[in-house]
Amino acid sequence: MTSPHPPKTPPGPSNPDTLLSNRPFLLFWTARVFSAIAFQVSAVAVGWQVYALTGSAFNLGMLGLVQFLPMVVLTLAAGHAADRYDRRAIVRACQAVMGCSALMLAMGNVYGWLHIAGIFSAVAVIGAARSFEHPTMSALLPGLVPDSLLPKAAALSSSAIQTAFIIGPALGGFLYAAGPAAAYSMAALLFLSASLLTSFIRFDRVPPRWNSRDFRSLFSGIAFIRSRPEILGAISLDLFAVLFGGATALLPIFARDILHTGPWGLGVLRSAPSVGALAMSVFLARFPLEHRIGHLMFGAVIVFGLATITFALSNSMLLSLGALVVLGAADVISIVIRMTLVQLSTPDEMRGRVSAVNSLFVGTSNQLGEFESGVTAALLGTVPAVVVGGMGTIVVAILWMRLFPDLRRADSFERRKS
């Protein structure tokens, strides 16, 4: 006899037809937006305050180093932790630590006891927390949605970051006009709100845990990537493409000396890649990629290189903005495909360590890309340096198509066998 009350479908990531009905993903996405905006707000405030206090460009460069070093030192340990412990607890704790650090900066400004050493200490703590937060959030995402929705979820997750890149700096500058404490207080509020939202994420199935205590397991993510040509090709492609295509590091020179614009123009130029990236993220969330993903990824990297060359040769503000918008859009296509391929090719118990290595590669490529652009510009000149970088990106894409033929021929995002 049929029951008059059919069983209810349990909530959670395994059943929803759309991401809008997936409460864990919505909490994850909102928390990621809050955390990313908070970081951008605090970064703008810290940069302005350090320069106001010291007038030293060297100290501004040291801010980047203070954030970069914890990532290099801690990222592999972060991946180890993400595979062994509750990923939600790690993310929640990291966001709370960053919120408390921002709150300390706000209170130091209100009561007048904050000095430059305190600012650098807070930045180092935030950098250490982000070293754990970023790879853990990447590893957390596949457990929140079914495999069929992961490409769309990856696109929306990328849109969270791009939204922060657009909103965060503007919000930080606006709040800083009322005083640094206002900016830091907003950052603290957003970080702590993100931590609270993360605590509400629930699974309908508990992801498998990995319990090894072997020290060598810290490096097992690297060994796993080396054993999977598809993952190695995708991650190394991003590493070298960004390494050569770091035109954004030279935007101040293009704004002032080539496009003859002021600080407002520099701000618009900095926002342009994120505008293109956000638009493409929304498009991919609405129309997810399904076939010929290998060709699309390599094509996107080549378009990235062509847009970089176009930007370098442009003397028109409008053309330069268009090139940067295309550059950002192409970058997101590559990021979404790479992220989805890596996650679906990695067993859940390895995702933390693999995501940590991926984060380390991406972070290193961004930092080294800026360094490479600066050194090349000093040797060759600004425009030739960016042209050479764009050409290098294209050469890498063509070379990688030959070195990783399976990656080039990848057709769909179906889960790979481990």
Image (cartoon, grey):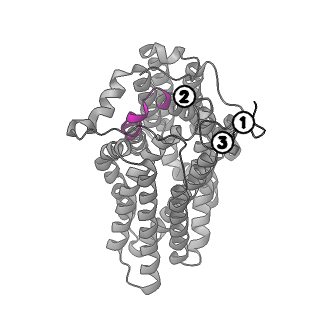
Alpha carbon of mark 3 to alpha carbon of mark 2: how far? 15 Å
Query: What mark, if any, has residue 301 been given in the picture?
Result: 2
- Label 3 packing within 10 angstroms: few (<14), some (14-19), many (20+): many
Mark 1 residue element:
helix
Mark 3 residue element:
helix
Q: Nearer the viewer, residue 138 or 241?
A: 138
Residues drawn in magenta: 343-357
What is the x, y in percent for residue 302?
A: 56, 26
The residue at 74%/37% (across/down) is: 6
- Label 2 packing within 10 angstroms: few (<14), some (14-19), many (20+): many
First in sequence, mark 3 or 2: give its number.
3
First in sequence, mark 3 or 1: give its number.
3
In this view, 184 is above or below 10: below
What is the x, y in percent for residue 310?
A: 61, 34
Question: Can residue 71 be seen?
Answer: yes
In this view, 103 is above or below 353: below
Q: Nearer the viewer, residue 414 or 179?
A: 414
Amino acid under disc 2 = Val
Residue furthest left as drawn: 215
What is the x, y in percent for residue 202?
A: 54, 49
- The residue that mark 3 highlights is 276
Relative side of 296 to 242, left or right: right
Mark 2 residue element:
helix
- The residue that mark 1 highlights is 286
Amino acid under disc 1 = Arg
Relative side of 404 to 271, left or right: left
Alpha carbon of mark 2 to alpha carbon of mark 1: how far? 22 Å
- Label 1 packing within 10 angstroms: few (<14), some (14-19), many (20+): few
